[in-house]
Image: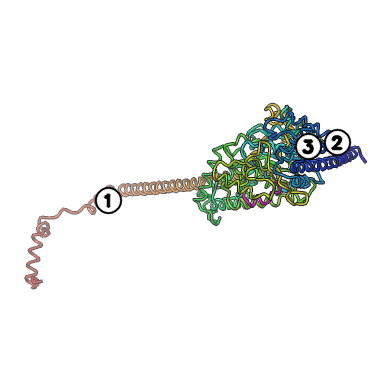
Amino acid sequence: MSAPDDAELARLQAEAEAAEAALKLAQAKAALAAAQAARAAAGGSAAGGSAAAGDSEAAAPADSEEKTDAEDDIPASAPRNPPSPRNVTPDAEAPASAASPTGPLDADEIAAVVAGYTFEGQTLDLGALMNTEPVPAAQIRIPLAMMNRHGLVAGATGTGKTRTLQGLAEQLAEKGVPVFAADIKGDLSGVATPGEPSDKLIARTQAIGQDWKPTASVTEYFALGGIGKGVPVRATVSGFGPLLLSKVLGLNATQESSLGLVFHYADANGLALVDLSDLRAVLTYLTSDEGKAELKTLGGLSAATAGVILRELITFADDGADVFFGEPEFDVRDFLRVAADGRGVISLLEVPGIADKPALFSTFLMYLLAELFEILPEVGDADKPKLVFFFDEAHLLFTDASKDFLAAITQTVRLIRSKGVGVFFVTQTPKDVPSDVLAQLGSRVQHALRAFTPDDAKALRATVGTYPKSGYDLERVLQELGTGEAIVTVMSEKGAPTPVAWTRLRAPQGLMSPTPDPDIERAVHASPLLAKYGTAIDRESAREILTAKMNAAAEAEAAEEAAAAKAKADADKELAKQQAAIAKADAAAEKERQREHDRLMKATGGTAKSRTTRTTRKADASPLDQILNSKSTQTILNSVIRGMFGTGRR
């Protein structure tokens, strides 16, 4: 066996031994906590309390000492009760036990929680059970194999959702699972920098049994369209698809289906839709004189609807959204990378530059998730997921979403589990996520909720109604949770929900503030992905093809007009030529007649002219002819003739 195999075997053996020891310790501490809780509930005597305290110190002296130190340093926000009976003298223990509150859970319920969160495989540690005070023996965990069953992290602003997300991401990466998360405000970038210890932090972590130490995770930074410091993440319009694009543009159902027809036309005609200018070129062509005939072949797409979509695209591009579309298109397989030391890479998508485009941001995340679903093979139930995808600000995704869009999300979430991908939605209230999607989520980490309005109170009651029955008054507890506390229930290894547990969550081991910008820039410049995606590519696509086609049509039309003009000019020239020929022929004929005339005159010695003159001129009339031809003479003659022949009556 090779050296790396030996090292891996040794590591696995050490982990198995540590897990077994931790399990035994947890069971022993749980039994101890249950016994103490039972004694406190029964209000034991001072003597009995002293004996129990002695037993507890004998069973776990190290734990007792650690808890004493921790409770001395816990900040005011952490403990809300007097010290534990283990931290007082035997003489004072009995009255303290009798007077101290027992918490919402009794001993049997604590034992049930411990048993419910004890698993055989690898786990992610969420924190310690709260029973008014932390119960370090009752650790709340999520089975690593169940992280692909999805989950929800919810809570009001400022309740610690981001820190919960950071802690889960750190533990997943440590166990070799790649993580993707959108860094809305830049707070998550601290995961790449070791955390800074403080007395308050150490006291809190010791109180919940966390062995905290500053640790940095392997982190890759990305930015949508290159707006920001990270490696650019782009998508082609064709890859984005009409359904997601309709969500971004705010189209109604009719316009959404019409946009689908446009995509179909582009695919059928080999028109690559790379960026928004390509889609605009297709719509412009279809609404132009050249494309009207082809527009009629697209059933159900009217010129008016195409015009509406075109106007929305122009507005969308003018807002700067066109930079998110283009090539090279990002390959989502690059989110599945593992570092050389076996740790998973945490991919953070920087999005502060598009804070004014929330719909685009959330829809782009959905596109990445859909791409993962398309390209990843089926893996079934694996020991650990291939990737865990944290969907922050999830309410933006579902706002004003069409039925088709919600159906696509639900189907993706339902089926992507078998591809080894877990999806965690991070939002303010569970009502932000549709019920069909919530039904697919196996784990829930619910931070504090506020009930300042009747609608808030109604949402709170609805949230409480979705939890299994427990020993908590959840409607009250959910409003009293402190920062960094949550109500937790997860899916066990057997696929059943675990008991509801009020949990004080573990602190992240990375920096809980943003990593300095110079460190981020150095990490980006050192990334091997920058050479792959850093430079945009503008290849021939629909815009160039249709521009060439329309230019060719314009050139053909211009050529036809030029040919018609040339034909007219040629006709005019031919007419002028013919007229010139006729004029020339007339001139030649006239010249020939004149020549013939001159010849005759010369031949006759001038007599021809006299004869011609006599024949051509009218002879002068005599006086008698003038009298006879006058109108008066003609009238008299006619009267005489009519009288002679009897024609006068007629």
- The numbered disc on residue 138 is none
Residue under label 1, please give it.
608
Image quadrant in which you'd find residue 342: top right
The residue under label 1 is which amino acid type? Ala
Q: Nearer the viewer, residue 13 or 67?
A: 67
Image quadrant in which you'd find residue 23: top right
Asked if residue 568 is among those painted magenta in the image, a careful observer would answer no
Asked whether residue 272 appears in the rendered view, the answer is no
User: What is the CA distance from the residue labelled 1 to the residue labelled 3?
Assistant: 174 Å
Foreground label between 1 and 3: 3
| Span shown in magenta | 434-443
Residue 618 in the image, given as x and y percentages of width and height: 20, 54
Describe the element under mark 3 as helix, strand or loop. helix
Mark 1, residues whose alpha carbon is within 10 Å: few (<14), some, or many (≥20)?
A: some
For marks 1 and 3 on the same chain, the one whose residue lies earlier in the sequence: 3
Q: Which residue is pictured at 9% across the width and 58% down the height?
A: 627
The single residue placed furthest to the right in the displayed view is: 1
Image quadrant in which you'd find residue 351: top right
Residue under label 3, please give it.
46
User: What is the CA distance from the residue labelled 3 to the residue labelled 2?
Assistant: 18 Å
User: What is the CA distance from the residue labelled 2 to the residue labelled 1?
Assistant: 167 Å
Foreground label between 2 and 1: 2
Q: Does residue 108 appear left or right of residue 429 in this picture?
A: right
The residue under label 2 is which amino acid type? Ala
The residue under label 3 is which amino acid type? Ala
